[in-house]
Image (spheres, rainbow, N blue to C red):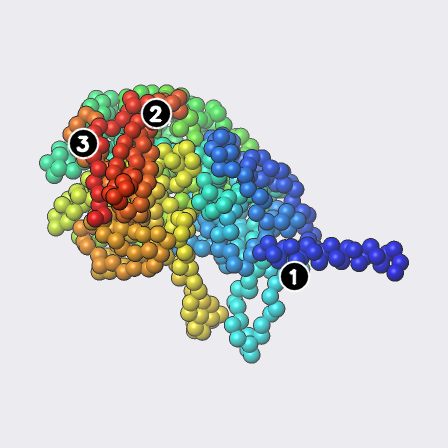
Amino acid sequence: MNSTSKKQLLKFKFLLILLIIGGLHGYSQNTMISGMDQLQWEKVMPGVWKATFGTMGMNAFDYINPPKTDAITALGDVAFPFHKDSTFSQLTPNHATVRLPLDKTENIYGLGLEFDGINRRGNVYTLKVDHYGGTKGYTHAPVPFYVSSKGYGVLINSAQRVKIHVGVGNRKDSKVPTPIDRTTGENWPARPLSDAVEASVQGTGFEVYVFGGNTPLEVVQRYNLYCGGGILPPKWGLGFWHRMHTQSSSDDVFNEIKDFKEHNFPLEVIGLEPGWQNFAYPCSFDWSETRFPNPEQFVQSLNNKGIKVNLWENPYVAPTSTLFKTIKPYTGSHTVWLGEVPDFSMPEARKAMMDHHQKNHLSIGVSGYKFDEVDGYDFWLWPDHATFPSGNDAVELRQLYGLIMQDMLDDHLKKQNKRTYGLIRSSYIGASSKNFVIYSDHYSHKGYVTALANSSLSGVLWTPEIRSAKTAEEWIRRFQTVCFSPLMMLNAWSSGKKPWSFPEVTDMVRDNIRLREQLLPYIYTAFYKYQEKGIPPFRAMVLEDGYTSQDKLTGGKLDDSKNPYAEKKRIEATDQYMMGSSILVAPVFSGQTERKIVLPQGNWFDFYTGKYMGNGETITVQTKLEQIPLLVKDGAIIPMISDRSQNIPSIEARHYGSKENTYTLYNDDGESYDYEKGQFSLTELKVEKRKNGKLIGTSKSTKNNKFNYGEITWRWMTH
């Protein structure tokens, strides 16, 4: 055998070994993708890698808090999750594309806020900031970050609109199944299985980040921590919010507060809709002289009652605004509702807007804002060909606009050592560290619950706000979901509804709101873990240890008008989620007299009674109109406020099941950023078994007892 033949044989053996190793690893390997270059990876932190190709435009990381390096390091290191030689990029005159490997058994989750389904496998998404309109990827927060069931995550860091093919669309030189003749074969697939995820933008390049982890939850943690961690909202933000009718006056607000007191309903935040201004759509950002003749006295009066004020606005500046002349040089070529569009990528525009807000709102005690109308549709926002004085691309500005607005206000208030909590209509990469919650005009109750679960996979918080209902049953069911979400709010901007608008369920509504407020220590501690460790306080079941996804394909019957390609439908359990470390929330929808709940491995118990409910199985529960089903893990310790009338609330620590456990209860001043300087308290709640098998609970302060709760008593829920 000559030397050339020997070299060819050695090369063949080497490639064969690579293929065998690749097969053992579980991923298809292909180093022969024509026209594509292999990505070059740089390790930037433990479990975090980055590859860059081409050139980028705007960068979302310019508006994101710096990574929490120590917390990422504490997660430990992991290996790169797939073979680097199976990752590719390609630049053409019109597109920048990446190709990453995908095993045939993987499920893919994430890609931002979505109202339909949770597994993204086998679909194509165009990730465009927009109103939800049924197009896959058109949402308020189309975050180009996905999580694999194999334990890794991928971020396509681009401000351009990312189009992503998730296991669909085969290259001719990739490893694909053998075609099946539809007319004679069986199980012909309308969407043949692909061995890759391919993502592209109409641009000149972007960054790709890979986040490793031992579990999908650890992947999400690492992503959130790389984006600055999660938020820790002020305590008042986790109370009950009521948004007034848009034409309400200060007198109307005072009357509303009086009605809340007479009906014995708690109230922490009053939201004022467009009519608080003397001109809206576009906005003046100036108080209405007729509806709010003395705004300083009005806001201070509410603050004295322990009620915060949140103001609605969109960012488009009306010619009548006292801000108009100052900000006009820093606005774009096109208007929205005939108002000028500030270029908030310019420091001058941000300063002008914040100076006006500080002088007219924040200095008199306004707590924060609801930033509306920064998402879509195309006929409402600036066109893709619009120009801005910064020179930044109009498409990129639209993708980042909501994120920049969040960063603008957060940065302004943090300099004053004030936490805020607000609402936003548009978000993007790295939003976990921003003090805002997404909301929407989309009003499907089931879609709201799916969105709540999906958002947790992409560093976004979501509120299933209630606006109205057709029946008393729908009213209480929506309220129950709202009470177990990141922001508890009735948005009566148009309906004028009150919590007591359906008298037959008023007591139930009140009880659910009060239960949420009793759970404040538990929920606040969950947000602390979000801030410190990146663990979403409300999260999808696929992030829960021991949970088995119920995802499956079914049906596929040929129908020449409704299903001409005989495609199967994906069935998923998206109607339940985790709240904090130990509570499973299973919302009920109108008309349901029973519902199924998928339990992860381990013993689970009824929150209300402590009764054993099951272990790693799907159970059916009979619904009660007055209660939302809540299930609790074995060994869970749930701290609840037992007496709010005291200056320092006392705590009832509930324990479920029979397991020993330790729970760290967090508290601080609830308003400032002093916790970043160590001004917070930690209390260890511990349950141990005595020799006779009896459980005993103890508590001790482990850090700075300045913010400790009052007396702690124990309640054993499972007998």
Tag 1: Cα neighbours inside 10 Å, few (<14), some, or many (≥20)? few
* Whole-number angstrom distance, CA of label 1 to CA of label 3: 66 Å
* Among the 4 quarters of the image, the one containing residue 524: top left
Q: Earlier in the sequence, mark 2 or mark 3?
A: 3
Q: Which one is in front, 582 or 82?
A: 582
**For mark 2, what is the residue?**
703
Seen as rendered, the residue at the extreme front is: 691
Seen as rendered, the residue at the extreme left is: 262
* Among the 4 quarters of the image, the one containing residue 355: top left
Q: Earlier in the sequence, mark 1 or mark 2?
A: 1
Q: Amino acid at mark 1?
A: Lys
Locate residue 397 relative to residue 254 in the image: left or right: right
Tag 2: Cα neighbours inside 10 Å, few (<14), some, or many (≥20)? some
Residue 393 x %, y %: 54, 37
Q: Nearer the viewer, mark 2 or mark 3?
A: 2
Q: Which one is in front, 266 or 31?
A: 31
Tag 3: Cα neighbours inside 10 Å, few (<14), some, or many (≥20)? few
Locate residue 541 relative to residue 194 in the image: left or right: left
Q: Amino acid at mark 2?
A: Lys
Residue 253 x %, y %: 18, 32
Query: Could you tell me which residue is drawn at 66 percent across and 49 percent down?
Result: 85
Q: Nearer the viewer, mark 1 or mark 2?
A: 2
**For mark 1, what is the residue?**
172
Label 3 secondary element: loop
* Whole-number angstrom distance, CA of label 2 to CA of label 3: 23 Å
Question: Is residue 638 in view from this perspective?
Answer: no
Label 2 secondary element: strand
**For mark 3, what is the residue?**
644
Location of residue 558 with respect to 169 vertically, above or below: below
Q: Nearer the viewer, mark 1 or mark 3?
A: 3
